[in-house]
Image: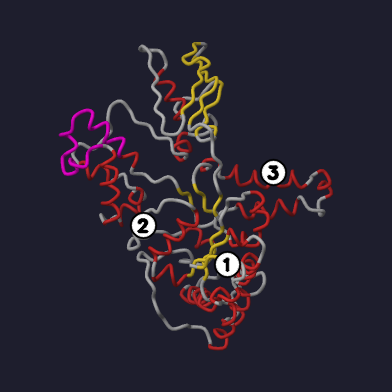
């Protein structure tokens, strides 16, 4: 699910900012505002507090009083690393660049894909990286110096190079494998129902505000990013989502049900000495009981399928898009173009030959190693099913999205 962001009047708002060191006020009741694409300059003699103001904004120094808001988020209560995640970057007076590397290499090592342990080991200089480096180099007026050693640059050019290293990052999107927000949402709904005697003190407006607050507070550090919250629950909560977040979008990835059940069974058989939480760590059972379990109304496949039907045929389907597994694996570029179009964001050039993601610790706790591991190359693979024929045929009529005649609300199916 995509959570839409709310526009803010100012990019940066500093109000009544004060910091005191043992009674000495280094910054006293300072207020100023910066709008999008605006440049502001803080000037003053040595000791006037210019650097302290920057330390306050970046979280290195904590304010005694006052407020610092970046895109509507209060920074004074955040740690330094949380402030960085909001999109605040700092450029120091002395350039922090790698002088033994070329301009190209300095920009390249700042590319987000190579900043994790596994990302650095698997990193490859491909067309996507080269295009991004050249794009940023043109912004900082160094496109004709890409092959030059950073040590050869003038002081001003080194300053621009460090700015370019910040620009190489792509903090606009925030996405995760899964998260607790859906669980919080349903638990709170239950607690605010008639099952709780104190529910009489809550009206619909208060309930909406409390539930909306779960999203806003959990994702406070990403408030100005485009946030993807992954949970099969959301298709069953389209009415509530449309009310709380009218601009939200729900993207449902769909695949023929029989092949989903086949993939789960394949994973179970590959981990023959592990008992999976998917089946309550039951050491018995057969392919038949497992297929029935996951495809039942409360099963991980059956619930998701029923929730999708509710969204697809319901009154709030205008905010829904279905993305076929076959499209994603056979035409990944076209699939991602459709996603960016649907959420209203500019296209980012992904590298479909170097996709790195796993959740080994999480999967191990589930007793299902490899559940969320993604193959490096996005491609379509054909194979034989391991399901008995009668089980495979059982799901033939479940793939309703392939029948255009049933799409009465004209839901976008990619």
Q: How is the image coloured?
A: secondary structure
Which of the marked residues, 3 or 1, is nearer the chain's N terminus? 3
User: Do callouts 3 and 2 mark residues in contact (Cβ within 8 Å)?
Assistant: no
Residue 139's disc number: none
Q: Distance between the Cα atoms at labels 3 and 1?
A: 31 Å
Residue 36 sits above or below residue 93 on the image: below
Q: Quadrant of residue 356?
A: bottom left
- Secondary structure type for disc 2: loop
- Secondary structure type for disc 3: helix
Which of the marked residues, 2 or 1, is nearer the chain's N terminus? 2
Q: Given this view, does label 2 or label 1 mark the residue nearer the observer?
A: 1
Looking at the picture, tell me which residue is in the foreground, 307 or 105: 307
Tally of numbered discs:
3
- Secondary structure type for disc 1: loop
User: Do callouts 3 and 1 mark residues in contact (Cβ within 8 Å)?
Assistant: no
Which of the marked residues, 3 or 2, is nearer the chain's N terminus? 3
Looking at the picture, tell me which residue is in the foreground, 258 or 43: 43
Q: Which residue is mark 1?
A: 410
Mark 1, other Cα within 10 Å: few <14 / some 14–19 / many ≥20: some
Q: Residue at x 37, y 60 (%)?
A: 355
Q: Which residue is mark 2?
A: 350
The segment highlighted magenta reads: 141-164
| Dominant SS in magenta | helix
Please tell me whether residue 143 belongs to the stretch shown in magenta. yes
Mark 3, other Cα within 10 Å: few <14 / some 14–19 / many ≥20: few
Residue 209's disc number: 3
């Amino acid at each position: 699910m995509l959570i839409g962001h709310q526009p803010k009047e100012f990019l940066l708002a500093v109000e009544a900012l004060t910091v005191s060191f043992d009674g000495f006020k280094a910054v006293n009741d300072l207020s100023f505002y910066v709008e999008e694409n605006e440049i502001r300059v803080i000037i003053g003699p040595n000791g006037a507090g210019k650097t302290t103001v920057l330390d306050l904004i970046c979280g290195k120094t904590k304010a005694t009083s006052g407020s610092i808001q970046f895109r509507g988020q209060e920074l004074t209560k955040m740690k330094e690393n949380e402030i960085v995640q909001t999109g605040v970057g700092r450029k120091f007076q002395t350039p922090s660049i790698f002088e033994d590397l070329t301009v190209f290499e300095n920009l390249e090592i700042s590319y987000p894909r190579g900043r994790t342990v596994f990302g650095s080991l698997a990193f490859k200089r491909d067309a996507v990286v080269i295009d991004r480096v050249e794009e940023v180099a043109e912004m900082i007026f160094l496109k004709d110096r890409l092959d030059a050693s950073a040590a050869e640059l003038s002081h001003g050019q080194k300053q621009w190079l460090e700015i370019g290293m910040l620009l190489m990052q792509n903090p606009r999107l925030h996405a995760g494998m899964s998260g607790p927000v859906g669980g919080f949402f349903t638990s709170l709904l239950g607690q605010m129902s008639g099952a709780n005697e104190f529910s009489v003190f809550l009206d619909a407006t208060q309930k909406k505000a409390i539930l909306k607050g779960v999203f806003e507070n959990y994702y406070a550090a990403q408030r100005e990013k485009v946030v993807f919250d992954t949970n099969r629950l959301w298709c069953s909560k389209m009415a509530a989502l449309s009310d709380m977040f009218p601009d939200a979008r729900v993207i449902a990835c769909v695949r023929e049900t029989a092949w989903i059940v086949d993939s789960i069974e394949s994973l179970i058989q590959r981990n023959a000495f592990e008992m999976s939480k998917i089946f309550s760590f039951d050491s018995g059972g057969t392919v038949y009981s497992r297929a029935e379990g996951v495809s039942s109304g409360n099963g991980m496949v059956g619930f998701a399928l029923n929730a999708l039907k509710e969204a697809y045929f319901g009154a709030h389907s205008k905010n829904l898009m279905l993305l076929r597994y076959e499209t994603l694996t056979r035409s990944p570029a076209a699939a991602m173009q459709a996603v960016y179009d649907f959420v209203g964001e500019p296209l980012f050039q992904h590298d479909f030959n170097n996709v790195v993601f796993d959740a080994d610790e999480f999967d191990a706790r589930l007793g299902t190693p490899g559940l969320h591991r993604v193959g490096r190359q996005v491609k379509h693979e054909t194979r034989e099913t391991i399901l008995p024929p009668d089980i495979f045929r059982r799901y033939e009529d479940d793939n309703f999205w392939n029948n255009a005649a049933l799409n009465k609300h004209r839901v976008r199916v990619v």
